[in-house]
Image (cartoon, rainbow, N blue to C red):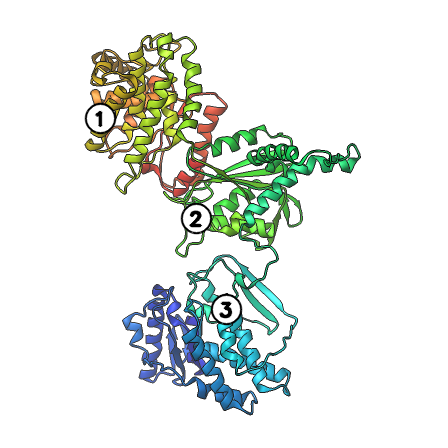
Amino acid sequence: MGKFFKGLASCGAWACFDEFNRIDIEVLSVVGQQVVTLQLGIRRGDTRIVFEGSDIKLSDQFGVFITMNPGYAGRSELPDSLAALFRPVAMMVPDYALIGEIMFFAYGFSDARALGAKMVTTFKLCSEQLSSQFHYDYGMRAVKTVITAAGNLKRDDPDMDEDVLLLRALQDVNLPKFLAHDIPLFNGIISDLFPAASDTKPDRKWVIFDGPVDAIWIENMNTVLDDNKKLCLNSGEMLQMSKQMTMMFEVEDLSVASPATVSRTVTFLRSFLGELVPTMDNNLTQSLMNILDCTLDPFREKLADGTGELQPASKTPNAQFKDDIEPLFIFALIWSVELMSAGKHVLMVGGTGTGKTVNITRYLQSLPADVYIPIPISFSAQTSANQTQDMLDAKMEKRRKGVYGPPAGKKYIIYVDDLNMPKREKYFAQPPLELVRQWFDQGGWYDRKLLVFRSIIDILFVASMGPPGGGRNPITPRLVRHFNVIGYAELGDDSKTIIFSTILGNFLGSGFPADIARLTDSVVRASISVYNTICRELLPTPAKSHYTFNLRDLAKVFQGVLMGDSRRITEADSLIRLWVHECKRVYEDRMISTQDHDWFRNLMRSSVKEFYQREYDQVVTNEHLIYGDYIVPGADPKIYEEVVHVDKVLNIMDEYLLDYNAESKSPMSLVLFMDAVEHVSRISRIIRQPMGNALLLGVGGSGRQSLTKLATFMAGYKCFQVEIVKGYGLTEWRDDVKKCLLLAGVKDTPVVFLFSDVQVVNETMLEDLNG
């Protein structure tokens, strides 16, 4: 803006700044100061002033005019100090008929008055009779667009009937934006006024913008879309768009586009397209064709190399053929994950804990390593398109100029977990998903530094996601259509019973007394009943956002029961106490209110009585039900057992604390009381489990880190922490994470990575942990 004002003030020119309030509020304040400087110089009669550090000539003939549309999305309110510098002028609704008559005369129409009246009448009847849609516009811009179109046709064919030219202009401008049910009404309005007209197809160039629009970036194209047809760059340079060029915006909807932009374009809806075969269920059809293609692929290979021939099925009775083909189709449908081997992209959709990640990971591990290289990526709410592109570009090798991919002879399988987790922007776009869709549609993406297109080859996408809700967002159907979608249904109680009965039955059937093994069915039914009740009653709220339960929690209960030892569980009550303890650890440890704790204990009492025919107080005799493998220091193997004498556990942990202080460079001065002992036992239980991860919630200074260090020492693990110093950034963070992974993976040292919320200096740290 400073450059504009320097030029205007020096040469005494006038300038009109259209849609002035699209400038950010911070910039508007600076602009106001610039205008004040120039106005004060004129009032003083100065011929030269110092403006923005430059001595310039000041002409009192220069003028600045601004236009603005208040109330639109993406607009700023003009500061009062800036608004006072300009004289306000309110615009009235113009006489469209008079303006049309004059403009028609200017374009060489002889019957301009009648044509103007017909055009205005057409728009008036359309506004009254047609449906009210967001993108319909019958204002001055629409009138001028029709007149301009008619004038262009007049120049192309001066001898054609003027009514036909106006009809052609009205149809070209309005028909593409009308909905299907409005088109007959529009044709009825003009049928009595105009005859039909022929069409011409000039040679044109197209610039296509494929993706979601918002009220910010698309309005930068307003100067290109209006009569100026110029693109104004930040450098002040302007690019002229030729008459043979057309800009197209391919979008899913116009829910966030401003009327100022919509009115500058001609809207075309997909419903206008006639289709021989309806594509409403295009994804389902495409998935079926992919499965059929993979099923017939072995036969095609045999025929191609001449090693086999197809046998006719004419001798097979129709009923028998149907009985044979249905199981084959169902088998292919269930195992459609094998589509990845045939180069098809797969999307797994299902609730949390239904086995999507486990199935995909197991399948990727079974693929031949000399051909396929899996690349796992986890999306979260903070994942950006730049992060996604950087992660993928770092894995690519240059094949030839402008073409990148995996090492020669190999293929990348990119597994995207939680595909729908990236949060939506202000105008609902999800940039990471748009980047993935760009690869599907265009085969690559642009290098952000060199601004050249990079073609990406020999990669395959497989993704998983949960249903929208709970932080997950709906994803655009334009991305889903590229995948073969496989749905994972929630497991029913019968399926859960079969799965966990098999697991627990095999465990209790080896080495445990017969009366304990007979409790398999009771433990399974009780666990499922408690899980269903908790999912139904303890729903997440803003104050209890972590009250989210899924099948993983049910599996953790059985995982805890499977840690029991046959040398300690010798009677039925011992197994019931272990089951109660594991339920308390999985569910009750997550509860934050006394009311919820009391409700859960009542649930456990009723469950023990219903499924085990025992009284809870007779089975659980200790007020503090504690299990752990630390009772005997130095034992090998460590046995996970009940702490019968609770008073002695304080002495045991004091001994562990003394040993820790003797070995540690940073001794801890702790006073261990019963609540602290229980917390240490809970942390120890999590540490001893495979892939055990803990999220410790609490206020600062409540002992979360100290108790974790003690539990880590008791388990014989090494506690690894990052040290936050001045200048600590992502580079230092990733170096520390590498040290931890090398310590665990290369040196085979059991490690607990302790990370506090106060150490999060960059949200990307959490992204790295999530991945």
Where residue 31 appears, as percent x and y from the top left, is 36, 70
Residue type at the position of mark 3: Lys
Label 3 belongs to which residue?
A: 177
Left or right: 63 with respect to 676?
A: right
Where residue 275 appears, as percent x and y from the top left, is 59, 59
Who's the residue at 37% across and 72% down the image? 69
Q: Is residue 554 visible?
A: yes
Dot placed on the residue nearer the N-terminal end, 3 or 2: 3
Left or right: 362 with respect to 517?
A: right
Where residue 684 appears, as percent x and y from the top left, is 33, 21
Marking on residue 602: 1
Of residue 254 and residue 449, the one placed in the foreground of this image is 254
Label 2 belongs to which residue?
A: 474
Q: Gap between marks 1 and 3, in whole Å?
A: 63 Å
Q: Quadrant of the C terminus?
A: top left
How busy is the neighbourhood of tag 2: few (under 14 within 10 Å), some, or many (20 plus)? some
Q: Quadrant of the N terminus?
A: bottom left
Q: Gap between marks 1 and 2, in whole Å?
A: 39 Å
